[in-house]
Structures are given as C-alpha cells and as structure tokens.
Image (tube, rainbow, N blue to C red):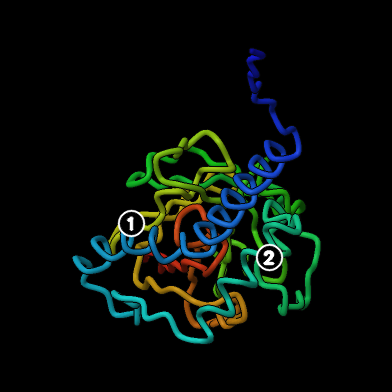
Amino acid sequence: MKSYSYKKTKDIRLNIGRILSGLLVVIGASIVFYISFPLISWHIYFTPVFASLDVTAPIPKTTILTKEGIKTLVTSASQKIAGANYKDAHTWFPTYQIINENEAKQTTYTLVIPKLKIKDGIVSTSSYDLSKHLVHYGGTAMPPNNGNTVIFGHSTLPQLFNPNDYTTIFANAHKLEIGDEIIATINNVSYTYRVKTILVVNPTDTSIFSQEFLTPHLTLVTCTPPGTTWKRLIIRGELEKI
C-alpha cells in the first residue's frame, strides 16, 4: 500500500505581502504620532510650566484642537516631511518681509542667559544659519538702542538640551520666567534685560518684529512646543536703566 506525505512549502509572495502590510502600518502610525506630537509635548512640557507662571501675556494653558489647529499641524508636518530648512531663520515667519535691512557695523555680539546656563552665545547679524549661532534678525534694533532687538535660536526636545550646541540652545527657553536676566554684550559693554512678557504666537503673526522706539527691548524667538515647528515662543525683555 502506497503512502503519501505532504510537504508544506513557503509562499514567498505571502511573506512579502505580510512585510509590506507591516511597513504600511508602521508608516501610518508614525505619521499619526508625528502630527499629534505637538499637542502631546505641549501638555508634557508647557502646561505645567505656564500654569505656574505669573505672566501678563495671553499664554494658552490648555489647547483645544480646532479646525484651524488641525490645519496648522498638518501644514507643519508636511513642511517637515518635505524638508523645510528650519535651521534657516528666514523660514520661521514665511509671510514676513525684512524691512530696512542695513549691514550692521557689528557682525557679532554675545548673549548670556544665566537661567538657561547659556554663556557667551554668539549672535550673528550677517548670517541666518541657526546651526552655527544665534541670529539677530535683519531690520531690528541693535542692543542697547531704542527699539526691538529680535534674536532667533534653534530648539529641540528639552532632554537633548546642550547650551554649547546651537541646534539645541533654546530647548529650555520655556523655563524662563518674568524677571529673569538676558545679558547682551557688544563692544565689550554688557547690557542687562529683564523678561517682561512671554507669549506663544502662530508663524503668521509678525507683530513680534514691530519696533517701539520709546525704550530698548530684546525679544527671543524659538519654535514651540519643544521638538516641533508648530508655533513660536516669544520672550521679551526690557533694558534695565543704566
């Protein structure tokens, strides 16, 4: 009597299909996480900090996801995926056109922020490459002149903060409080600014560049929440009387 045996063979096409399905699931989950991450990091890093601050600026202590919010999240994610270069300060406020940008006589000066352990951070008035230095935005006042000195700094997740790395130098900027010091040194003279205002704006809000010539101000700008390019954290200080 003949006996028959069956040998199970592997279907290569089936295995490839499973692998592709798994990759699609991972990619889809990654995209969903990337888009929702700003809200997650907002509540992790910002809500506890801002809830404890006594500030005069309208900082949102909670975030409600509206249609406009979803739109900005998707736009931010798509720009990141498309390769928008956020190490170039020009890209942070895409609707803003620099007005009256004259070549500064001083090409660099330094910034000290004791609260953030930033010592002698270089501020460039001629280059917008945030991976190499902080950026003094063209058309804004030079310290300690009357007007608004606007300085951009790159940020990332707070756990990656390194005060000596310009790609992470403002990762802890959200920890600044009203009254903290920001010291600008130019031509070997130091000028101390005290934080007076903290707020969060959309990239379409260019009012932070406005020049008020009655008193000298200094404005720090970085992306927020940490690790995203969703909104802009604005920290403005006023020059102490010498």
Q: Is residue 129 above or below residue 152?
A: above
Q: How many marks?
A: 2
Say which of 147 and 199 sits in front. Answer: 199
The amino acid marked with disc number 2 is Ser
- The answer to whether 137 appears left or right of 35 in the picture is right
Identity of the residue drawn at 48% across and 70% down: 217
Say which of 103 and 11 sits in front. Answer: 11
Identify the image quadrant of residue 86. bottom right
Horizontal and vertical percent position of residue 162: 47, 35
Do we see residue 217 in this rendering?
yes
The amino acid marked with disc number 1 is Tyr
Dot 1 or dot 2, earlier in sequence: 1
Few, some or many C-alpha atoms within 10 Å of disc 2 (few <14, some 14-19, many ≥20)?
some
Residue identified by numbered label 2 = 78
Do we see residue 210 in this rendering?
no
Query: Which quadrant of the figure contains the C terminus?
Result: bottom left
Residue identified by numbered label 1 = 45
Identity of the residue drawn at 64% across and 12% down: 1
Secondary structure category for the residue under label 2: helix
